[in-house]
Amino acid sequence: MPTRGKVVHYPGQALYDIDETVVVLRLSRRYLYQEIRAGRLRTVKAGRARRVPADAIADYVKLLEQEAQAA
C-alpha cells in the first residue's frame, strides 16, 4: 500500500505489514529490514507474513529518541 510521500497514520491498528511500517516510520524498506535483522525493531509472524506490532513501532521510536539524546 505505497502512498508516495504521504504521511499515513493507522489509528487503532495492532499489526502493520512491512510496507505500512515503511510509510509510518518514513524509512526505506531496505533500512527497515536491516533494523529488524539487528533486533532493533521487533516483528511477529502471522502465517507466512511478517508483521510489526504497533507497540514495537513505539518502542523503536523511543530507542531512536534515547540514542539521539545520548549523542
Image (cartoon, grey):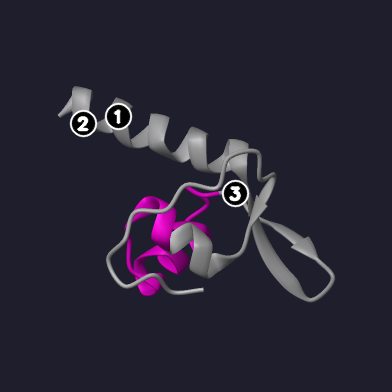
Q: Residues within 10 Å of mark 2 (few under 14, many from 20)?
A: few
**Does the magenta run of residues contain 15?**
no
* Identity of the residue drawn at 40% across and 29% down: 62
* Identity of the residue drawn at 79% across and 76% down: 48
Snapshot quadrant of residue 3: bottom left
Residue placed furthest toward the left:
71
Give the labeled residue for mark 1.
65
Spatial CA span between label 1 and label 2: 5 Å
Spatial CA span between label 3 and label 1: 17 Å
**Residues at discs 1 and 2 in contact (Cβ within 8 Å):** yes
Judged left or right of residue 66, residue 11 is right
**Does the magenta run of residues contain 36?**
yes
Q: In the drawing, what numbered circle is on residue 42?
A: 3
Q: Three-letter amino acid code at disc 1?
A: Glu
Residue 7 image offset from top left, x and y in percent: 34, 54
Residue closest to the eye, 25 or 10: 10
Judged left or right of residue 31, residue 58 is right
Residue bounds of the magenta highlight: 23-41
Q: In the drawing, what numbered circle is on residue 68?
A: 2
Q: Residues within 10 Å of mark 3 (few under 14, many from 20)?
A: some
* Identity of the residue drawn at 38% across and 52% down: 25
Q: In the drawing, what numbered circle is on residue 56?
A: none
Q: Secondary structure at mark 2?
A: helix
* Identity of the residue drawn at 35% across and 66% down: 31
Q: Secondary structure at mark 3?
A: loop
Please determine whether, in this image, residue 3 is positioned above or below residue 24: below
Q: Earlier in the sequence, mark 2 or mark 3?
A: 3
Q: Three-letter amino acid code at disc 2?
A: Ala
